[in-house]
Amino acid sequence: MAAETNPIPSVWARRQREPDQPALSRAAIVREAITMLDAEGIEALSMRKLATRLNAGATSLYRHVATKDELMELAVDEVFGEITLPPADSPDWRAAATEAAGAFRATALRHPWLSSVLGQAGLAHLGPNLLSYGERLTAFFTSAGFPEPVRAIDTVISYVVGMSTTEAAWLTTVARAGESEAAFVARLMPAAREATAGFAHLAAAYSAASADPDPAATRDAKFAYGLAVVLDGLALRLPR
């Protein structure tokens, strides 16, 4: 019997096989993979380690998910199901766009690996959750009156992904240090001030940062500032 061919390299283009054991399902595999990704990062995830955690053989996993790339597609789509969006007919488009961007950021920070793999997860955009997300977001920007809603969406999402990638990497570093963000910043700042002693503007910025009692609130404010600038620019694209 000829081997099944899959001309499109995506889990969404392949028919799901029948499970070989009732306790093991694609959903269970994906949930455990996300738990591993959240706790240990992408580098620690392997099909063999995942099978061990599920008390299954690697062969059993491959009946549901053919490759690690497919697993990442599934994980990305599952996480996108967590992102909430305002109604498409929200009367204040800026407030709604701010809410949508904040929900994306919050999800990306809960799952620090997400932003870094969005451009690498194969054809993840074919997943049902991501398709639903894209449809609702397009409906919202269309209802707001943008003549090119997809480009408006790309602009906002690019900003959120860029900011959350940097933010997630920073928070991962803090977590590995095993201390609070404020304590980590306080310990880092003396070295930063010394390194920037010959650079007046940077030295002033680091001096202000060292006195910051709430780095998380500062990150929130930085995100809000940049998002407001992006939305200011998009507002110019609306028909007058």
Image: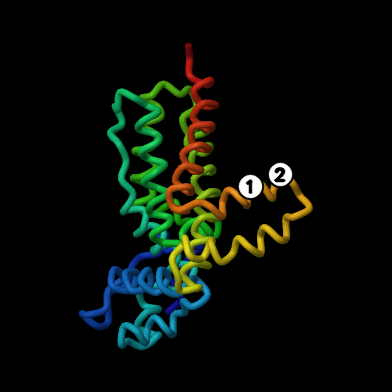
Residue 225's spot in the image, x, y percent? 50, 36
Residue 163's spot in the image, x, y percent? 53, 49
Residue 77's spot in the image, x, y percent? 38, 57
Q: Which residue is drawn at 48% across and 49% down?
A: 219
Residue 186's spot in the image, x, y percent? 53, 62
Whether residue 121 appears in this view of the structure is no
Residue labelled with disc 1: 205
Relative vertical location of residue 228 with respect to residue 146 in this rendering, above or below: below
Q: Do the residues labelled 1 and 2 touch (CB within 8 Å)?
A: yes
Left or right, 131 with respect to 186, comes to left
Relative vertical location of residue 39 with respect to residue 102 in this rendering, above or below: below
Relative vertical location of residue 92 with respect to residue 223 in this rendering, above or below: above
Q: Residue at x 60, y 60 (%)?
A: 189
Q: Looking at numbered disc 2 in the image, what kind of residue is underneath it?
A: His
Answer with the quarter of the image where residue 61 lies. Answer: bottom left
Position of the N terminus, as image quadrant, is: bottom left
Q: Which residue is drawn at 45% across and 66% down?
A: 72
Residue labelled with disc 2: 201
Query: Looking at this view, is 112 or 79 the one in front?
Result: 112
Query: Looking at this view, is 140 or 232 the one in front?
Result: 232
Relative vertical location of residue 146 with respect to residue 40 in this rendering, above or below: above
Q: Residue at x 53, y 33 (%)?
A: 230
Whether residue 9 appears in this view of the structure is yes
Left or right, 75 with respect to 195, comes to left
Q: Residue 228 carries which label?
A: none
Helix, strand or loop at disc 1? helix
